[in-house]
Image (cartoon, helix red, strand yellow):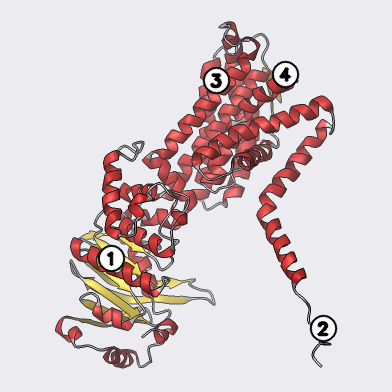
Amino acid sequence: MLFIVQTALELGFLYALVPMALFLSYRVLDIADLTTDGCFVLGAAVSVVMTAAGHPFLGIICAMIAGALAGSVTAFLQTHLGVPSILAGIITNTGLYTINLMVMGWSANVSLLKTETIFSMFKSTGIAGSWHEVLLAAIITILAGILLLLFLRTRIGLSVRATGDNMDMVRASSINPAFTITIGLMIANAMTGLSGAMVGQYQNTVDINGGTGIVVIGLACLIIGETVLGRRTIRKGVVAAVVGSIIYRLIYAIVLYTKVVPVQGLKLITAIVVALAIASPRIKEWIAFQKKKNGFVKPTGKEEV
Amino acid sequence: MLNIENISKTFNPGTVNEKKAISNLSLRINDGDFVTIIGSNGAGKSTLFNAIAGTFYVDEGRIELGGQDITYLAEYKRSHVIGRMFQDPLKGTAPSMSIEENLALAYLRTAEGMSPFSYISKKDKAFFREKLALLDMGLEDRMTQPVGLLSGGQRQALTLLMATMITPRLLLLDEHTAALDPGTAEKVLELTKRIVEENHITCMMITHNMKQALELGNRTFLMSDGDVVYDVKGQEREGLTVEDLLLKFRAGTGKDLDNDRMLLST
């Protein structure tokens, strides 16, 4: 059991920055940013390749920069070229496949053999023993979360939030929405890249298809977290991303361990959960309407004689 | 102050929906003028405001504000000096952000030279509180609450405050009290009058209430078919009644003033 919890915490923290990035793009900016899948692999690829070259720390930083650049491409497509936001993300995502292969030296996967990673380096300090991976991932993720919260309270952070909240107002208050969308998507994708970078070094490998479905899983985590904590404030949203990620990985680990559901079935279940969660307001409306309709007594015409 | 020369704007040119919203409109507004604007449905009142604010660029003509040519200046850049309010009270504020955060956004207009990474300071908060107290709606004690919890009237009053907190060169009010209940509308209008007078703001206000159009401000425009057909100020305006205005309109356009909401309000 402890093993399951430990695995869940490890993966939960490692992947938590994806739902956090989606919180920024989907909830705060109100943009469904589908750059995520490719961006995650991009982060992992940059990080693993740089680690193989002996620069694990630089690898993490470069992965974030690469993620931010991917985000800026998506932002440019929608703010300056009029590409619908969802399509902009898909286009960038498709292009990233080639970029990722290029980063990985045109091979579909790259593995690290006995190379120092940030995790092995942290392990050798002896802090936290066998929990060193959990601790390091938690530190990085929580730090990123705090920085994001601090950012969202600055003047420019307020502008980013207002862009997703009321575009009319933003234009009328001397904020350039193209600029705030770009900033927001760059930060979101830098976080996705950071998550990919950590996962790459944690698994000592990167695969070109390693990001498939990450965006839906990230949304599932965010929704789980929001269901547990409620979604009112910015702070709750950021915490919800982390909590949701850990809960999701806990469920994942339990399924993997107990085999109640075949592991291959998890993505389908995740997809259904996300679809239902996003559809829930509409479903509730429909149920309420049906109740109202059934409570309505149909005039038969017989009474009026 | 505001100098508009021969502007035109056609929407959907070359299609069946082609609509010439503004045609060869010229006007000149002086510093400190408070202009009320009335006109039929589709006369181009809101289009004129959008042209001034930069929601779109005009097809022809020139717009100058305070001696600066703003014809091709981006909308968000014009917002530095132009304050705007819409009929829909939801349009002017960000619902999920708190009152003080909304005010901080409006305050951004002066933020030039201020770091974009700076926070709302204690001094800012004290300033916001002082301004909110002027509204006399108790909002100064609810500064950390999300704006979405406020009523339409409160939101509109807040928007007014945001639009005028940094005195704009020009304030555009597009029927900003029309969606409020009469009592609240009265109050927001009072506030508008007071703030505009105290800060000597040059102001243009669209209204469908003809009595209001004559009572408020120092100048009135009648608009029809994308142009100003009647411009009245000074002594001529003082003795003017609603009936006179209707006659002027018919004389100017050969039509009756038809604005469904105008007919319903007296």
The location of residue A201, given as percent across then percent down, is: 62, 19
The disc at residue A300 is 2
Inter-mark Cα distance, 2 to 1: 57 Å
- Contact between marks 2 and 1 (CB within 8 A): the answer is no
Q: Amino acid at mark 3?
A: Gly
| A66 horizontally vs B174: left or right | right
Inter-mark Cα distance, 2 to 3: 75 Å
Chain name for mark 3: A
The location of residue B12, given as percent across then percent down, is: 49, 71
Foreground label between 3 and 1 = 1
Chain name for mark 4: A
Tag 3 and tag 1 share a subunit: no
Check disc 3 and report the residue beneath it. Answer: A59
| A129 horizontally vs A150: left or right | right
The disc at residue B191 is 1
Check disc 3 and report its element: helix, strand or loop. helix
Inter-mark Cα distance, 3 to 1: 58 Å
Check disc 1 and report its element: helix, strand or loop. helix
Foreground label between 2 and 4 = 2
Tag 2 and tag 1 share a subunit: no
Establish if A150 lies above or below B44: above
Q: Amino acid at mark 1?
A: Leu
Check disc 4 and report the residue beneath it. Answer: A2
